[in-house]
Image: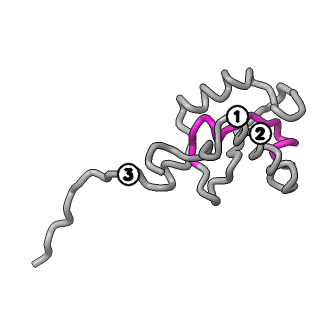
Amino acid sequence: MQVPKPNHKRRVPKQADRNKFSKEVMQQIYERDDGICQICFSSRGTEIHHIKFRSSGGRGVKSNGILLCPYCHRLAHQKWEVAESLRLRAEKKYGPDYYKDEWD
């Protein structure tokens, strides 16, 4: 005889869900950055970039997101110096825990 699986609510959401930007957070980032790339100040095709990468534990919080154009977004993933300058900028503005959420 099989024992039924318990149906309980998670205390902490799954990590994959915590790393995604919600629609509300995405809207806040677009408004904060005025819809323009924060490196080259272009307004064409901006997209949200995780300043601290999701693979490194960066969460989907407003302070960990920044708007970048596709070219600068590619640079941020290819050049360590670009990514590091964005991390330092966020740390200076929001503090050392800029990439954490309420459960960290």
Q: Is residue 67 above or below residue 13?
A: above
Quarter residue 88 falls in: top right
Q: Nearer the viewer, residue 60 or 90?
A: 90
Mark 3 or 2 closer to N-term? Answer: 3
- The span shown in magenta is 59-73
Residue at the spot 20% in from the left edge and 65% down from the top edge: 5
Are discs 2 and 1 less than 8 Å apart at CB?
A: yes
Name the residue carrying label 2: 89
Q: CA distance from mark 2 to mark 1?
A: 6 Å
Q: How far apart are the alpha carbons under marks 3 and 2?
A: 29 Å
Label 3 CA crowd tier, 10 Å (few <14, some 14–19, many 20+): few
Regarding mark 2 in the picture, which secondary structure is present there?
A: helix
**Which residue sits at x=87%, y=42%?**
71
> Which residue is outermost to the right?
40
Helix, strand or loop at label 1? It is: helix
Furthest residue in direction left, as rendered: 1
Quadrant that contains the N terminus? bottom left
Pointer 3 residue: 12
**In the image, residue 14 lies in the stretch drawn in magenta:** no
Tag shown at residue 85: none
Query: Dot 2, crowdedness within 10 Å: few (<14), some or many (≥20)?
Result: few
Q: Check disc 1 and report the residue beneath it.
A: 93
Name which residue type carries label 1: Lys
**As drawn, 70 above or below 14:** above
